[in-house]
Amino acid sequence: MPGILRGLLPFAVAVPVLLAVQLLTADAPFFVILSLTVGVNVVLAVSLNIINGMTGQFSIGHAGFMAVGAYIAGVVSKVLSEYGIAFLPEGVSDQLLYAISLLVGAVAAAAFGFLVGLPSLRLKGDYLAIVTLGFGEIIRVVVQNTELFGKALGLSGVPQRTTFFSCWLLVVLVVVVAWRIRRSTHGRALLAIREDEIAAEAMGVNTTAYKVRAFVVASFFAGLAGGVFAHYQSIVAPSSFTFVKSMEVVVMVVAGGLGSTTGAIVAAVFLTLLPEALRSLFLQLSGDGTMAQMVEQIRMPIYGLLLVVIMLVRPQGLFGTRELWEVGPFKRLFGEKR
Amino acid sequence: MSEPTGLLHVDRATMQFGGLTALSDFSLDVKKGDLQGLIGPNGAGKTTAFNVMTGVYAPTSGRVVVAGEVMNGRLPHQVNRAGLARTFQNIRLFKELTALDNVKVACLADDRPPQSLFSRHRVDADRREGRFLLAHTRDAWGNYLDWWRTFLQTSGFRSDEARIEARAHHLLGVLGLSHRADELARNLPYGEQRRLEIARALATSPKVLLLDEPAAGMNTREKAELMGLITSIKNDFGLGVLLIEHDMKLVMGICEKITVLDHGETIAVGTPAEVKANPKVIEAYLGVESKELQA
């Protein structure tokens, strides 16, 4: 029991801190909106890092898993919103139902992760990438043509229940889980597959099973991220889950360094805030907002340029496979490598 | 068919790739405490024999038996679990991991304590007695719970990790690599990389150890040291060892029994002295002309 209590310690710290921040920022809607976008992207990047960074498989269909989570959670939530749990105050009941729909969405996404993980047993590198890409597109096209999901217009009327607290609690959860996987037998098995699949297999690692498990865990969290996204956007449209979104997450993981959880976090925060920063910069420069509107259009060229520069200057990404405190100036700050 | 007597028993294994027979009618029996050699010129099929034994290739015919279990149709990781561990001719370490982590990878989590409801011991017992569904359920649940133990960092998880860590440190110590524990595998000197591969193989708790040219690229003194080490590991861990080696002199020095391959055929089996005197071996190694020279 004390073991489990110690295991829950990060959450015991995170819950009051996040609640405090939520209360303090109640009057700053811009901050909250921005933090939700950042949070969702951090969850996506950290979870994709489990597949692309730790296991060394190349998935470029992460938006597909996010879409599954978003749509399923959205539909469930819409259905559940007509009910309330008796004996509970409305706010608490709402949050509980919200949590349930997130979970349903995430489990659905994990099931798809399992299905997509299966071909990864046979396919490597580019071929697997094509399959995941295809999967992402299939999901998008299917929801675009399904009445239940609102076709091309999207699913509207999803109750707005995402708060700063719930979104960032999810961030803490995914980071803690990724961190713990990394430092366990399971994580070492994933890393071994990345390093040398044949040797891993010869050392008794069931490489097939582990690759599928990596997909399942990562898509579960992508599904959660999708659910959170659906519950603050209120409208879930297929255009949010295009190939561009998948690429965005891939860029975050590659920029942060494949295999580095902290790298994925830093890159996700930076790349999410970059367009916002540019927007306000351009607003300052031109004043009338015409330049600021260009940001959305020049965002992808900037990502592309960034990728090219990273590949030329630092092909291993910001931190390589290492973590924040194992790199350069931070090393001294955090003391010896653990 | 002969009945398996040893820990590793290969029974007339043949491996064909299309029209090419890389290995034909290869038989071998390794018992506990054996130190056997597998030699032959380049392209004789030695590594193919290793790959057949470890499940990388499924033999075209014949069978491989490890500790009484037939390995045909098993995947390499299952063969490893049955008790066969190997090293590679061209070193295949996990380069970007530390030496310690390299060994820890091989100390597996599903190596659960034998009293556990989900232990490998019970899974294997179920499988042997034909309760496949139960074996599968046991294994899957054990694994599922194991992930939760990892997420929640339960005390069981912590003690497992501590046990694995201690074991990995111990094995590094046995191979004289304690001082390299925190270094990345790719930064180790060549000889130490070879030793790390042996440490990693030992971490899987094998019954038989297959070493593919463990002394390749070493000088004479290093080779002698390594052979001493292999002998003592064999005795301390109670293993059977089968090693591939090019250096005839070296193999002759330490192996009790030698199998010689040439063009996939077993051309001689016996003690070093017998093998050395075998005309076919001389021919394979020195060429036909040498016979004329000797005559």
Image (spheres, rainbow, N blue to C red):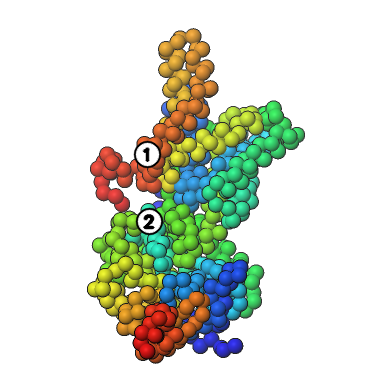
Q: Which mark is residue A314?
A: 1
Circles 1 and 2: CB distance less than 8 Å? no
Q: Is B57 in front, or is A275?
A: B57
Q: Position of residue B165 (x, y in %)?
A: 35, 63
* Residue at 53% in and 22% down: A297
Q: Position of residue B47 (x, y in %)?
A: 46, 71
* Residue at 63% in and 51% down: A115
10 Å crowding of disc 2: few (<14), some (14-19), many (20+): some
Q: Give the Cα separation between the discs numbered 1 and 2.
A: 19 Å
Q: Which residue is mark 2?
A: B95
Q: Amino acid at mark 1?
A: Arg
Q: Is A232 in front, or is A113?
A: A113
Q: Residue B201 sits in which quadrant? A: bottom left
Q: Position of residue A217 (x, y in %)?
A: 54, 50
Q: Position of residue B182 (x, y in %)?
A: 30, 57
* Residue at 50% in and 71% down: B48
Q: Amino acid at mark 2?
A: Lys
